[in-house]
Image (cartoon, rainbow, N blue to C red):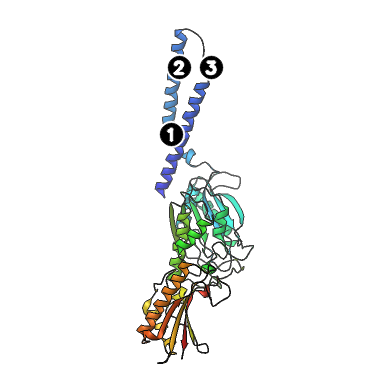
């Protein structure tokens, strides 16, 4: 952080020096010309040289004083902290780690940060400047280190209360929609505090179902013009741990979420993206947001419906997003054993792949569903079912098991057994 502080100070000094030089040149160009003899001209030139020397000397002797004043001008907002309003589904986060360091740096430099709250419906519900300068109630800046530290700690508590204690007016999470509506200063650091589990369009994680590749999500949002402008920004995601009714994410979902938000930020123009996972505490809010379902682990036995003689493979649980690559081939093979037990020696088996969506002619969906059906067919063969008894087909978005074409449960491979 020390390097950042020095570079900011140099930047401020350089900018102000240029502005001062420009003002002096502008003033000189506006001075009226005087008529007179050579003596007056020489006198004026000599006087100008003397003035320039005086200014230079003062600049040298006053440099140290300006270093303090220019870096510590109060009232300038730099860092922006965008947070989703609190719900019972996400924990409160401490002002530690990289965010805490940034807030303490703002206090040391006597500057403000901007706190921007996003409601559960994506509306920007608060946008306030918070002065981190350690000072008394009457505005006197504290110079004694111990007292300044105490005041800074109190300011950190106030920032934490703003971020963690303001309950969402609308149940839900929509930090991406909030970013769309904001015009952020991308020359300054941007922190985003959220569980990153949005439940509103255009990034409803419930609809994505952990089974749509991040690149595909980005392409769709870019096509519809729904990406925020984060050109050149340095983005830090402070990830709220989940709480309440929201089920804990497993490692595949953690990786998917990070890959998705990285792709979104970079496609929006961000120059740098990083994540910090903090240890949270119980939420103050009692407002429950809709939960984002978490697929079962690939070790979970594939559900069998004895009456219908079907087995349904949840593709989000067993396959990588938008892929026929199995997350854990051995576990999926074991998970199919209960299904295989339903298949007799004279049974025929139909393996049908399905996807979610409303484009009935989507070649991508048809090809993906067919590849996934063939992957399950191979596992059934490895478990002793003759290849000649198994037919694998891909339906894409046609003949979906559930009426809502976007229902994540449509992303499946259904094994039907016929005697």
Q: Earlier in the sequence, mark 1 or mark 2?
A: 2
- Determine the CA span between mark 3 and mark 2: 16 Å
Depth check, front residue: 62 or 169? 169
Which residue is the site of mark 2?
Answer: 47
Which residue is the site of mark 3?
Answer: 32
Which residue is the site of mark 1?
Answer: 63
Asked whether residue 177 appears in the rendered view, the answer is yes
Q: In the picture shown, does residue 165 fall above or below 152?
A: below
User: From the viewer's perspective, is the residue at label 1 or at label 3 nearer?
Assistant: 3
Depth check, front residue: 384 or 289? 384
Q: Earlier in the sequence, mark 3 or mark 2?
A: 3
- Near mark 1 (Cα within 10 A), the count class, few <14, some 14-19 or many ≥20, is few
- Determine the CA span between mark 1 and mark 3: 32 Å
Callout 1–callout 2 Cβ contact below 8 Å: no
Q: Position of residue 171 (x, y in %)?
A: 62, 66
Q: Secondary structure at mark 3?
A: loop
User: From the viewer's perspective, is the residue at label 1 or at label 2 nearer?
Assistant: 2
- Near mark 2 (Cα within 10 A), the count class, few <14, some 14-19 or many ≥20, is few
Quadrant in which residue 98 is drawn: bottom left
Q: Residue at x 59, y 59 (%)?
A: 122
Callout 3–callout 2 Cβ contact below 8 Å: no
Depth check, front residue: 73 or 364? 364
């Amino acid at each position: 952080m020390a390097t950042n502080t020095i570079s900011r100070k140099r930047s401020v000094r350089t900018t102000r020096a240029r502005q001062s030089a420009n003002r002096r040149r502008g003033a000189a160009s506006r001075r009226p010309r005087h008529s007179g003899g050579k003596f007056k001209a020489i006198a004026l030139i000599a006087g100008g040289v003397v003035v320039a020397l005086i200014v230079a000397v003062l600049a040298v002797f006053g440099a140290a004083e300006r270093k303090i004043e220019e870096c510590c001008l109060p009232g300038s907002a730099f860092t922006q902290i965008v947070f989703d309003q609190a719900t019972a589904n996400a924990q409160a986060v401490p002002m530690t780690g990289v965010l805490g360091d940034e807030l303490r740096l703002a206090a040391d430099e006597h500057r403000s940060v901007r706190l921007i709250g996003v409601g559960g419906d994506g509306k920007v519900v608060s946008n306030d400047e918070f002065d981190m300068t350690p000072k008394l109630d009457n505005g006197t800046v504290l110079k004694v280190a111990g007292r300044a530290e105490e005041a800074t700690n109190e300011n950190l508590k106030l920032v934490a209360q703003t971020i963690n204690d303001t309950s969402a007016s609308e149940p839900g999470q929509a930090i991406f929609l909030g970013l769309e509506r904001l015009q952020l200063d991308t020359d300054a650091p941007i922190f985003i505090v959220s569980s990153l589990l949005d439940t509103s369009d255009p990034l409803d994680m419930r609809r994505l179902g952990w089974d749509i590749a991040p690149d595909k999500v980005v392409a769709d949002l870019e096509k519809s013009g729904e990406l925020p402008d984060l050109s050149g920004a340095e983005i830090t995601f402070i990830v709220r741990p989940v709480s309440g009714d929201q089920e804990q994410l497993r490692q595949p979902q953690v990786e998917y979420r990070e890959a998705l938000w990285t792709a979104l930020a970079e496609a929006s123009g961000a120059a740098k993206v990083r994540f910090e996972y903090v240890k949270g505490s119980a939420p103050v809010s009692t407002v429950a947001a809709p939960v984002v379902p978490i697929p079962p682990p690939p070790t979970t036995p594939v559900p069998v419906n004895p009456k219908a003689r079907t087995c349904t493979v949840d593709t989000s649980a067993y396959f990588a997003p938008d892929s026929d690559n199995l997350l854990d081939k051995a576990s999926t093979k074991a998970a199919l054993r209960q299904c295989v037990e339903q298949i007799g020696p004279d049974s025929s088996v139909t393996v049908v792949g399905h996807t979610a969506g409303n484009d009935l002619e989507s070649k991508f969906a048809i090809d993906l569903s067919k590849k996934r059906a063939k992957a399950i067919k191979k596992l059934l063969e490895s478990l002793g079912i003759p290849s000649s008894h198994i037919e694998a087909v891909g339906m894409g978005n046609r003949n979906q098991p559930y009426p809502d074409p976007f229902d994540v449960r449509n992303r499946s491979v259904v094994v039907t057994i016929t005697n």
